[in-house]
Amino acid sequence: MSSLRMERAIFAETMVQLAQGEYPQIQEVENLIPDVEIPITLIPKGVLYENALAHSEILQICLFDSEEGGDRVNQVPFDIDIDKEINARMSSRVDRIRYVFSFISLPVYEGIAVRFQRVQVLNDHAKPAILLEIHAQEQGSYPSTLQDLRPGREVLNATDPFTGLPYVYEQLGRSDFKLYSVGPNRIDEKGLIKHDYDDGDWVWRPDLPEDFDYKAYRER
């Protein structure tokens, strides 16, 4: 969350610099491409400040406000809909031109947030995965359910943030298993592994099957 707040601060600082006539980044682009001139001086200062404000407010609503009314500290929300806020505030063509800097930059945050969510889910999977490996070494196979783990080795009561239900576990023979979240599309695809984070499920497996289809894995 700190890095996301830093990104928001950098955007606001950039808008202020542009409004004050300081734009080294744009000058660098113009130096690299001599035939390109970016008419930043023609943009009213008020528009730049409005972009900074709109950008900050939308991120506050979508990322930083907690359900309790305070600020989120260390967990990215799993119900982000930045596009909805953008469309609500910038519905007309004039608005999208006026808020062009915010309109271009805001969608990037959803991709960033998804990567943070991915890390959180993998962290949730790590403890049961370790306990499952210990069980397999001691018993010769993975258990049929997580509840079959020996007493005293309770799995964290983490739930899939996309459904509010327990993560799905399935034993696959004696030497394999899959533990997964349904992922951002909220569709249980039976542990389907896809390259794109928005497709398939988010799966933890000890090994990929020998017939794993890498071509299908990369196709949307």
Image (cartoon, helix red, strand yellow):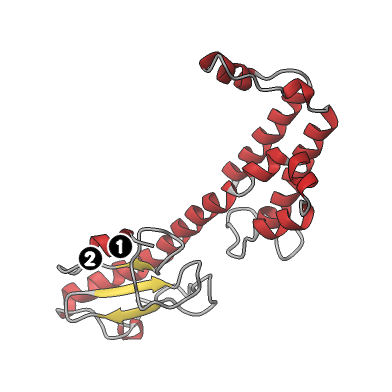
**Residue 136 seen by the camera:** yes
Note whether 35 is above or below 51 in the view shown: above
Q: Quadrant of residue 63?
A: bottom right
Q: Which residue is mark 2?
A: 213
Q: Which residue is mark 1?
A: 217
Of 70 and 102, nearer the camera is: 102
Residue drawn at x 30%, y 66% is 130
Find out whether the residues at labels 2 and 1 contact each other: C-beta distance under 8 Å: yes
Instruction: Kindly indicate the quadrant of the structure image that contains residue 205.
Output: bottom left
Please, what secondary structure does the residue beneath circle 1 have?
A: helix
Which residue ends up furthest to the right in the rendered image?
46
Residue 158 drawn at (x, y percent): 48, 72
Tell me which residue sits at (66%, 22%) in the image: 38
Q: Nearer the viewer, residue 46 or 144?
A: 46
Q: Secondary structure at mark 2?
A: loop
Q: Can residue 65 be seen in this snapshot?
A: no
Q: Position of residue 26 (x, y in %)?
A: 62, 21
198 left or right of 39?
Answer: left
Identify the residue at horizontal 76%, vertical 20% (top origin).
Answer: 41
Q: Is residue 102 above or below residue 33?
A: below
Q: Amino acid at mark 2?
A: Asp
Label 2 and label 1: CA atoms lie apart by 6 Å
